[in-house]
Image (cartoon, rainbow, N blue to C red):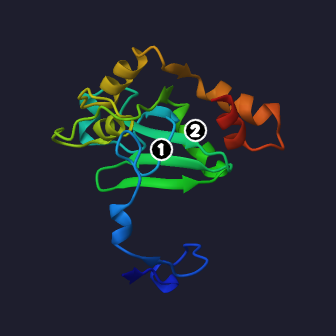
Amino acid sequence: MSVVAKEQTPGWRLAEARPFDLKDIQTLEVDEYGAPVTFEPARWLVCFVPGLRSQFWHRFVHPTHKHVLMLKPNPDGTWTLFEPWWTRLLVRTINTDQAVRYLRWAAMGDALLVEEDVPGRGSQIRGWSNCASLATFVLGRSYCVWSPNGLFRRLLAEARTERVDIADFVKGCLGAQPSGDLAERTAAAA
């Protein structure tokens, strides 16, 4: 039996240390897909954006679709950011002000509203992982893509995908109810 101590998890809100017994795993109930928690498919804003800094490989790819990142509004007014880079995979809960900064970047490119597949159909045999292939995997798609524009074309061809004008999206969310929260209204609209 092990105990998770508050000192080991700075920033976590643990009411008290909870005992954890490995025998609990043997009795863990799972859903039809083998997951301990069932989630409904989420809808992500998949943003295809130009690079912020010039890279040597930019001349070989689509003029605007040089990078892909994803944003998802949460019911509590925060946003989930998924952004793969060369040296890390950033998955972070951000506030509305931070989300608006990413949405301003998204307005420089293209954005799609995409529903993830649950369970996913992604393959673990992908080879090299870049922003496009990692986003494909998070969305649960089975196809292999190597560029943000390749992912854009594949997602745009799907019937459930909607093209989003970020400028109109932000104006609609922020302009309709200036005192309300962008993430909350976006979650309700999606």
Residue 55 x, y percent position in the rendering: 29, 42
Residue found at x 37% / y 37%? 67
Element class at badge 1? loop
Residue 111 seen in this snapshot:
no
Relative to residue 178, is residue 73 drawn left or right?
Answer: left
- Three-letter residue code for mark 2: Leu
Looking at the image, tell me whether mark 1 or mark 2 is earlier in sequence order: 1
- x%, y% of residue 83? 42, 47
Place of residue 74 in the rendered image (x, y in percent of width and height, measured from the top left):
61, 45
Q: Residue 154: x and y, percent?
A: 34, 20
Mark 1, residue position: 38
Between 52 and 96, the one nearer to me in the picture:
96
Amino acid type, residue under disc 1 in the picture = Thr
Residue 92 horizontal side relative to residue 86, left or right: right
Q: Nearer the viewer, mark 1 or mark 2?
A: 1
Looking at the picture, does residue 102 appear above or below residue 169?
A: below
User: Looking at the image, which is closer to me, 72 or 109?
Assistant: 72
Q: Which residue is mark 2?
A: 103
* Camera sees residue 96: yes
Q: Nearer the viewer, residue 26 or 57?
A: 26
Q: Quadrant of residue 165?
A: top right
